[in-house]
Amino acid sequence: MKIVTGILLFFCFVSDTFASESIELGIASSVESAILNENRPYMVYLPPAYHASENTFPVIYLLDGDVHRFKGLVGVLESLSTETLGSQVQQAIVIAIPNTNRSRDLTPSTLTQWTFNGRVLDTFEQTGKANVFALFLEKELIPKIQSTYRVSDKRVLVGESFGGLFAAYVFLHSQSLFTDYLVIDPTALWDDNYLNTTYEANFKQPEFQSNIYFAFANNAHLGEIGRTNYKWGSDFAASIITSSNANSRQQYFENETHGTVALLAWYSGLKFLLPTTEN
Amino acid sequence: MKIVTGILLFFCFVSDTFASESIELGIASSVESAILNENRPYMVYLPPAYHASENTFPVIYLLDGDVHRFKGLVGVLESLSTETLGSQVQQAIVIAIPNTNRSRDLTPSTLTQWTFNGRVLDTFEQTGKANVFALFLEKELIPKIQSTYRVSDKRVLVGESFGGLFAAYVFLHSQSLFTDYLVIDPTALWDDNYLNTTYEANFKQPEFQSNIYFAFANNAHLGEIGRTNYKWGSDFAASIITSSNANSRQQYFENETHGTVALLAWYSGLKFLLPTTEN
């Protein structure tokens, strides 16, 4: 028994040493999804004020939420929401959702072959299940987060590229699921102008209530594809902004491309959607 | 003994549960400084490629390095140096150095009362020991980091406000201590134009070899104080840039103030100083 105790003590001390030296950014967890029929991991960041108060906090849901993007968004948020950058932005919880099947979950219509002007842009095994992924968020993930953490009513969805397409889809079809949308260079080329086509077919006299911020990159180096993605995306954003009763804005980043725009979009989008003082 | 074992097992399991779920950003450590006659804590971030390779990595030393600023800079760096933002920037180690006595360590000359145009801006118990703090970096902290981690020859000093003043001071007096300097809205008002006065008195035909990036904020809302701090700072930067044999640049952020400019300065400064491809 002494040996066992010794071993246990050893591991406890080692463990304790590591624990006291580690700087934790968040925790990894998961939820068994009956809707998606798979286990979905997610990462959680709690802001500095969370454990220092009994307050409730907004929740930011980050799509394409791998650990690098999680660290990036959290770094921008923690800077902006503490004295580091003048506490301009509300402290918030972040839930990052890594992909298991990106094209299946984030696209709103079924395409095995994605084309533009007769050119094949990509092919996919599965697409078009954005409605199922949105149901997972609504019925499984959001309720789990609501019951686990002290959350306020403010929920922000952050999506980029296919994630931006998904966020725009949720804004159109299940808008009240989030109070705020941060849509970064969305894939407006999807399914031959899906976003504008869907908007025009379904929204004759819309009155949008959720806040939305669009960031667009300069993809002119991609030629017609880049220019058209921007035109269709900004046309869609303009339609939304014109019909919005809430805070809405689109911003163009001339010096950033599709692959680089995310950080400045987080920076400007969080300041727009989560200001500490009223706009 | 069974009770003791039970308690130990309990703590081990709790500890193990936390360990397996935690997302670690870095570790906290410290060094006993004979030069400063105090224990100096610091935080360490190792980039994703560190444990996946045997490579050496640049080291970024972050002044005013509290945990919020550490998370902010690391978030920007990890975004920029991974595929999240197109791997534009080299992966690097970050060493964040929190303050114990800010005005003592970061100011290069002794002032109990800091004035500008006859107005007292601030009073301090201790100032003017930048030379001692620089010696601590040279003789104690940097050697400890060099012997603990796989570091390359590239060392970047990041300082803001008083930290920017300190970084400019080290650039002038012990330039080879760092290969790169990221100087953010430095306190050029210090000691009645200390930086330009020192430069003009000591550097007749300089040939600077270290890279330097200056970021300046728009502090016009502070009136004469804000305008003069920018003028003196940008004059100093222009003198350095004119005499530089290395990469050097100054950038003005019209939409940011002294209290908010850091994040965009990290973003632009890291891209300038640590590009993955040659400029």
Image: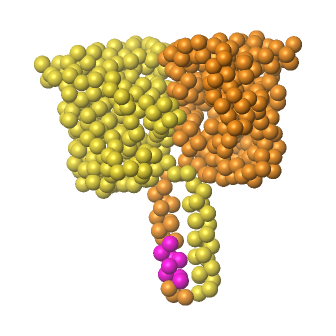
Chain colours: A orange, B yellow
B236 or B88: nearer the viewer: B88
Q: Residue at x 61, y 51 (%)?
A: A27
Please count the marks in the image: 0
Q: Is residue A49 visible?
A: no
- Measured along the vertical axis of the image, is residue B200 above or below residue A18? above
Using the rendered view, name the quadrant where residue A47 is placed: top right
Q: Is residue A63 left or right of residue A179?
A: left
User: In which quadrant will I find the C terminus of chain A?
Assistant: top right
Q: What span is colored magenta in the figure? A: A4-11
A159 or B210: nearer the viewer: A159
State the image coordinates of residue A40 (x, y, percent, origin top left).
Answer: 70, 49
B56 or B198: nearer the viewer: B56
Q: Residue at x 81, y 50 (%)?
A: A34
- Measured along the vertical axis of the image, is residue B27 above or below residue B96? below
Q: Residue at x 45, y 33 (%)?
A: B87
Using the rendered view, name the quadrant where residue B214 is placed: top left
User: In which quadrant will I find the N terminus of chain A?
Assistant: bottom right
Q: Is residue B125 left or right of residue B140?
A: right
Q: Residue at x 52, y 71 (%)?
A: A12
Query: What is the residue that sits farthest to the left in this orientation?
Result: B204
The answer to if A49 sits in the magenta stretch is no
The answer to if A10 sits in the magenta stretch is yes
Using the rendered view, name the quadrant where residue A232 is placed: top right
- Measured along the vertical axis of the image, is residue B41 above or below residue B271? below
State the image coordinates of residue B30 (x, y, percent, origin top left).
Answer: 36, 54
Magenta highlight: main SS: helix
B233 or B101: nearer the viewer: B233
State the image coordinates of residue A11 (x, y, percent, origin top left).
Answer: 50, 72
State the image coordinates of residue A235 (x, y, percent, origin top left).
Answer: 70, 12
